[in-house]
Image (cartoon, rainbow, N blue to C red):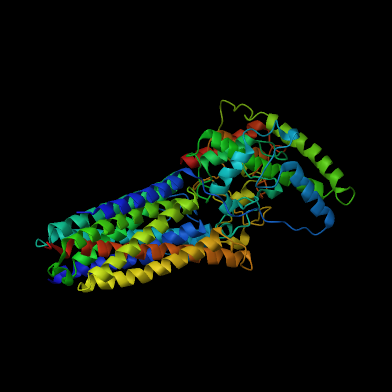
Amino acid sequence: MKAWFTIHRLAWLGLVFTIGLTIGIGGTITSTEVGMAYPTWPNINGSSLFNIFYGKLSEAFGIGSVVEHTHRQAASLTGLIMLVLAIMTWVKKETPKRMRNLATVSLFVVVFQGLLGANRVLANDYLVAIFHAVGAQLVVALLVMMVKESATSWQREAQPFPAHRVDRLRLWTTTTMVLLFLNLFAAASLRQKQGAFSGHLILAITTACVLLFVVQQVLTKFRGHVQLQRLAKTTAHVLGTQLALGVAAWAFLLGPLIGSLPDEDTRFLFQSILATAHLLCGVLVLAFVTAIWLEARHKLKPEATS
Amino acid sequence: MATRRDLMALSVVALAAATGLGISLTRPFEAPLEPPIRSFASTSETQLWDLLNAEFGPADAPTIPAAFAEVVRGDAQRGRELYEVQCLHCHGADGYADTYTARLLTPKPRDFHLGVVKFTTTASDAPPRQEDLERTLERGLEPTAMSSFANLEAEQRTDLAAYVMNLLIRGAVFEDARVRLEQQSPADALAQAVALETKRWTEAAAASIDPPARPQLQAADAGLKLFQSSKAGCFVCHGNDGRGLFTQDTPALSLLDMWGEASAPRDLREGPLLGGENATDLYWRISSGIKGTPMPPMEDLLSPEEIWSLVSLVQSWRAE
């Protein structure tokens, strides 16, 4: 039981670390466009990846290099957490096979992410950068699954609901997950200046509409399911914030308010913060939708109705 | 089981998603920023700037004047489109490298508006040729933020270099014309500057890209003597052992380049040499110097044989 609890806490740590640090700093890199502060990997011109002399680094290669360097360090630590998680699930005999598979897949995805990151820098390839961005979100989805499935509350029985309602919710949560990843691809293409804004806009509106439908379904048709209700309400709030951030990001980065800020420095800083906040909020939307999808798949029991 | 209503809704969603994805994959990104409007101290400079824009096009709609047609190959307008995606965030919307991203990087990305780049295969007082830019684009300048663009097709690199040539030439013409404004009208100053710069850039483009033939026997010893002699004077900055007297640990002793950035002499034994490490690269670095930096040209001080002996010395150091 103790080891099981440790896996749950470690998965939580990995999730918070991945979103708050690795993706947060990674998003800042793209927002400030300093990803190529030095085109070597993983070391900086012979200096170790785990070098923490940020002052010297900044002096030699600029502040941009520190941002890129800390992203690599955070990603390495994420990888370490995933490795420990995987080892724990392998060592602990009573770990369910599904959890062990999840941990193993997560470890492989994180390692692959590292290789994509390396390739993005060494080959200076924007397509790789797009897949690197989408891959990070896949890590988040996998970590959410591990957090949920290692929780003690996951041991509860599935609740019975009419089969047609359950089928419908499963269909539309799965659709939302697919749409979210497509939209992430479009958003990453836009951020890497490889795709048009309108593509991201269409996918964002479509995803938001479908997600709102899912929230409406949960709130009205699954009243007795406490976890789903709580997740749906939080998702609605996060989605609202994300839409507001999206409109603001469009207005200040691409739209009519682009020249409205007093000077170049303020504009750059504001745009970078706005774009990164929009990205992070998007990650939260994905995390909550993953949790809803998981609940819909495993904690609803379809019951035949006469 | 999904109902008919669900399937219909799903079809609409799939159609919308396919449209969004299709647009993302096929339609290009559109840069929202126009080049900044530059302001000048005098009316005549502003007039000169307007005339320059009429001659070379504004930075986001470049044209290569007929006088420079022999100097620039490729499509500068296509190059601009690539520049907006690949280069603008560091080098700026009009090549002045005054972006915020540029300020986060060391060394600073090149500001093209002075018409000078560091690494060329031309004489010390000559401008670069387009091949120099294409080589830098292909190789990059590791370990700086100027990464290799070998992933682009050769034709794309040519177009990109054509656009940068436009920025460099217009910069050189503007700087040349500006000093004439005290005696001449903006139109006359521009005409004279264009005539002079056409000659300079055309001659540079036509000159041989290969250095003089390397002698068969090249002893590094002869190079070391020359390196430590007052004739070449290399030891003054690079030290007797070639490791560089001024390092990043002692920035107070660092020298500055023409863009006002610290320019520490290289450690010639270890670490990267930005302009390339093969014999031809080293020959040009020593012969023409590194333009805009304190690394002086040796072409008037040393014979080609002597320059080759220094090349042998540096190569022997790096092989150790």
Camera-side residue of B179 and A131:
A131
Instruction: Report the quarter where the N terminus of chain B lies.
Output: bottom left
Residue A35 to residue A148: above or below = above
Please tell me in which quadrant of the rendered image residue A221 appears: bottom left
Q: Residue at x 42, y 62 (%)?
A: A279
Q: Nearer the viewer, residue B242 or A157?
A: A157
Of residue B10 and residue A12, the one placed in the foreground of this image is: B10
Left or right of B127 in this view: B101: left
Q: Residue at x 17, y 72 (%)?
A: A153
Which residue appears farthest toward the front when viewing the image?
A306
Look at the image and tell me whether residue B284 can be seen.
no
Q: Is residue A7 left or right of residue A255?
A: left
Horizontal relation, residue A24 to residue B253: left or right: left
Identify the residue shown where x is 28% and y is 62%.
A290
On the question of residue B287 being in view, the answer is yes
- Image position of A219 with respect to B249: above or below: below
**In the rendering, at what x and y percent does residue A135 appear?**
34, 53
- Residue B113 image position (x, y, % from top left): 69, 49
Q: Position of residue A282 (x, y in %)?
A: 39, 62
Residue sitting farthest toward the right:
B183
The number of callouts visible is 0
Toward which corner of the image does residue A171 lie, by quadrant? Answer: bottom left
Q: Residue at x 50, y 54 (%)?
A: A37
- Residue B306, x across and y down, in percent: 64, 34
